Amino acid sequence: MNALGLSIIAKLGCICSRETLDTSTGKTDIWSLGCLLYAMCYFKSPYDIVYERGDSVALAVLSGTVSFPEGSPYPENIHNLILFMLKIDYNERPYIHAVIEKLDDVINQVENKV
């Protein structure tokens, strides 16, 4: 992810509602973790494509729509893990324990395929 992508993610705090960014439960960190995992997989933020088109990043974030590059080398369960963390509705966003459980499931599925 380039510096601009990191800047966009850092500024998203100004875009989302206060409920979305409640830091008392760590759910904001879960959303950020989803952005980070996406960036680790694809070397850009989930919203870089929107920014590069000149569209509104704020609206893209609030729409909850995240797309993955065509021909992604990662299995669907990785995509689902990222989407699980990028829930816009604060009440639907998981706690870290649920993320760890889902990650364990992904790891087990990968190990069973080998």
Image (tube, rainbow, N blue to C red):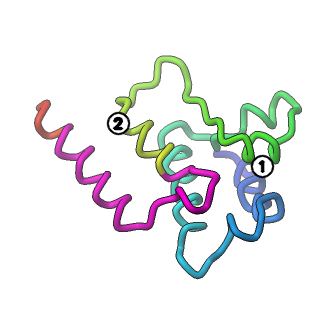
Q: Amino acid at mark 1?
A: Leu
Looking at the rendered image, the quarter that the C terminus falls into is top left
Residue 35 in picture, x, y percent from top left: 58, 51
Quadrant in the rendering for residue 21: bottom right
Q: Which residues are magenta?
A: 85-109
Q: Are marks 1 and 2 in contact (CB under 8 Å)?
A: no
Q: Which residue is mark 1?
A: 4
Is residue 37 shown left or right of residue 31? left
Residue drawn where x is 77% and y is 49% of the image: 4
Q: Nearer the viewer, residue 3 or 110?
A: 110
* CA–CA distance in space, label 1 to label 2: 28 Å
Most common SS among magenta residues: helix
Quadrant in the rendering for residue 108: top left
**Number of disc labels:** 2
User: Of the residues tagged 1 and 2, which is closer to the observer?
Assistant: 2
Question: Which type of secondary structure does the marked residue at label 2 adopt?
Answer: helix
From this viewpoint, which residue is outermost toward the top? 71
Q: Is residue 70 magenta?
A: no
Residue 59 in picture, x, y percent from top left: 81, 42
Residue drawn where x is 44% and y is 66% of the image: 95
